[in-house]
Amino acid sequence: MFGKKKQPPIRTLIGEGTAIHGELRFTGGLRIDGEVFGDVVASGDETSILVISNNARVTGKVRAGHVIINGNVIGPVLSDELLELQPKASIVGDVRYEVLEMHQGATIDGELRPLKADDKPGLKLAALKQG
């Protein structure tokens, strides 16, 4: 309804106190409450959702359709659909997104660019009518 895609259920959890070393590929939904040292990448053509909770830490590349971050990411982030940066989100790395929702308190130390930035003309300011 209203053009929204249905989100897949989150069926995989990396619990708090768990540390994973190496590349992590997933389909559907994944929630990270622990630590991942390596890339976290959604694979497949289906819609994906990745949640990085407020106690989580990812050191590596992050890529998924819908990405929700409230923890720490050290590395580039790419969201093909929607990127939600919640108040405790901290990213050190470049960020690319289709649609961005950023809450007060979230921080990014890197370049922030929309995916279609190369397709769009530069910023144009509307002239004020003097009257």
Image (cartoon, rainbow, N blue to C red):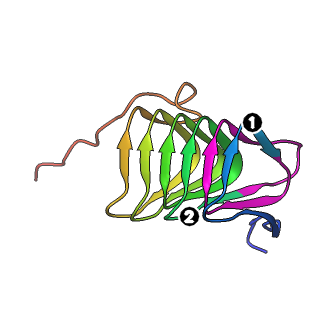
At horizontal 62% and vertical 35% (from top left) the residue drawn is 61
Q: Residue furthest top?
A: 118
Amino acid type shown at disc 2? Ser
Q: Position of residue 106 (x, y in %)?
A: 37, 57
- Above or below, comparing residue 58 to residue 48 in the picture: above
Instruction: Verify CB contact (< 8 Å) between mark 1 and mark 2.
Output: no
Residues 89 and 97: in front is 89
How many labels sit on residues? Answer: 2
Q: Residue furthest bottom?
A: 1
Q: Is residue 57 left or right of residue 37?
A: left
- Above or below, comparing residue 106 to residue 87 in the picture: above
Q: Position of residue 105 (x, y in %)?
A: 32, 61
Q: Position of residue 40 (x, y in %)?
A: 70, 42
Label number found at residue 53: 2
- Residue receiving disc 1: 23
Bin the neighbour count of mark 2 within 10 Å (Cα to Cα): few under 14, some 14-19, many 20 and up. Answer: many
At horizontal 61% and vertical 58% (from top left) the residue drawn is 34
At horizontal 75% and vertical 59% (from top left) the residue drawn is 30
Disc 2 is placed on an element classified as: loop
Q: Is residue 124 left or right of residue 78?
A: left
Residues 61 and 18: in front is 18
Q: Position of residue 67 (x, y in %)?
A: 63, 54
Q: Is residue 38 magenta?
A: yes
Disc 1 is placed on an element classified as: loop
Amino acid type shown at disc 1? Glu
Q: Residue furthest left?
A: 131
Q: Is residue 80 left or right of residue 97?
A: right
Residues 77 and 13: in front is 13
At horizontal 71% and vertical 47% (from top left) the residue drawn is 64
The residues tagged by marks 1 and 2 sit, at their Cα atoms, a distance apart of 19 Å
Which range of residues does the magenta coloring cover? 26-49
Bin the neighbour count of mark 1 within 10 Å (Cα to Cα): few under 14, some 14-19, many 20 and up. Answer: few
